[in-house]
Amino acid sequence: MSATDATLTVIPLSSALGARVEGLDLRQPLDGPTFAAVREAFLAHQMLCFPGQKLSADDQIRFCGYFGRADSDYKAPASILPVDERTKADYRKGVMLVTNVRKDGVPIGNLPDGDMQFHSDGAHRDSPYLATTLYGIRVPSVGGDTVFANLCTAYETLPDAMKARIEGLRVHNVYLLDATEKDEFDPDAPGMRHAVHPLVRVHPETGRKALYVNRLMSRWIEGMDRAEGEALVAELVDHSERPELIHAHKWTPGDFLIWDNRCVNHARTDFSPDEVRLLRRYTISEAA
Ligand code: SIN
């Protein structure tokens, strides 16, 4: 059956965000009306899960291409950075394996172990990623959930006085590859990847405002006393993680997820190092 013939069913996953999409085999190309329905669901629910998929990397890249440009930067395992020519030849463009699998004791991918604080992919770059896709290949029996937070609701539930206070402010975001907690790196160290973005981000497609701040990367406020800015960021970060904004995804192999980094943060819960976790990740940027 091609996706064209499929009946697409969208089932909300929680009151916070997220929907499960049934009836599509993403090995097949999507026709225009089917993609329009997927895109509508993506904008409405901010995170979509397509269960029971059997996707190659090429299938995943094709799906990314409907939304924008599948990123093709070389994302080598942190353990073998800097990337040399041999590595480039060996390592497929754009893919990041999120996994604790090791060869000779060395991780074959990125973000191997344990829990991870909330973040938005690419917030430390001048052009953050539009969306992220993650395909579950092997998952632990307990834990290793990917947890999502709705940043539109985070903004909308701020007190009016706070909305007025943060209007027009910009936040510094800093990140070191493979860090899972902000205390693992010094934001003032030379060469850190660093970007400044509006605290209140207007979604370019829905027009909704999102509170663009996260625990892992967001640090201080442009033009504000550093300590005062850090205190404000901490207050907003705590607000952005309130339980009513959160949906935790418990993985089953074959789940394929896409989420909107413009209005969603994500984190990860802890899991046993004795169980294999292997997911294939491609990010999506605005088409040039
Ligand atoms: C990520 O933050 O890109 C990885 C999330 C996860 O491992 O669940």
Image: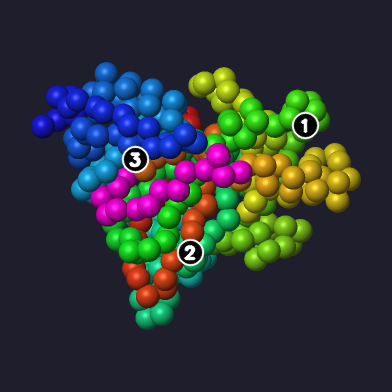
Q: Residues within 10 Å of mark 3 (few under 14, many from 20)?
A: many
Dividing the picture into quadrants, the one containing residue 144 is bottom left
The residue positioned 35% from the left and 71% from the top of the image is 275
User: How far apart are the two marked residues, 3 and 1, measured between alpha carbons?
Assistant: 33 Å
Q: Residues within 10 Å of mark 1 (few under 14, many from 20)?
A: few
Which circle marks residue 270 in the picture? 2
Q: Quadrant of the N terminus?
A: top left
User: How far apart are the two marked residues, 1 and 2, measured between alpha carbons?
Assistant: 33 Å
- Residue ID for mark 3: 49
Q: State the scheme by which the image is colored.
A: rainbow
Q: Is residue 153 visible?
A: yes
**Furthest-left residue in view?**
1
Q: Position of residue 17 (x, y in %)?
A: 46, 35
Q: Residue type at mark 2?
A: Asp
Q: Residue type at mark 1?
A: Met
Residue in front for this viewpoint, 285 or 234: 234
**Furthest-right residue in view?**
225
The residue positioned 41% from the left and 48% from the top of the image is 249
Mark 3 touches mark 1? (CB < 8 Å): no
69 w.r.t. 4: above or below: below
Q: Nearer the viewer, mark 3 or mark 1?
A: 1
Q: Is mark 2 within 8 Å of ligand 1?
A: no
Q: Position of residue 64 (x, y in %)?
A: 36, 37
178 w.r.t. 262: above or below: below
> Is 255 in the magenta?
yes
Q: Which residues are magenta?
A: 242-256
The residue positioned 44% from the left and 66% from the top of the image is 271
User: How far apart are the two marked residues, 3 and 2, measured between alpha carbons?
Assistant: 21 Å
- Residue ID for mark 1: 162
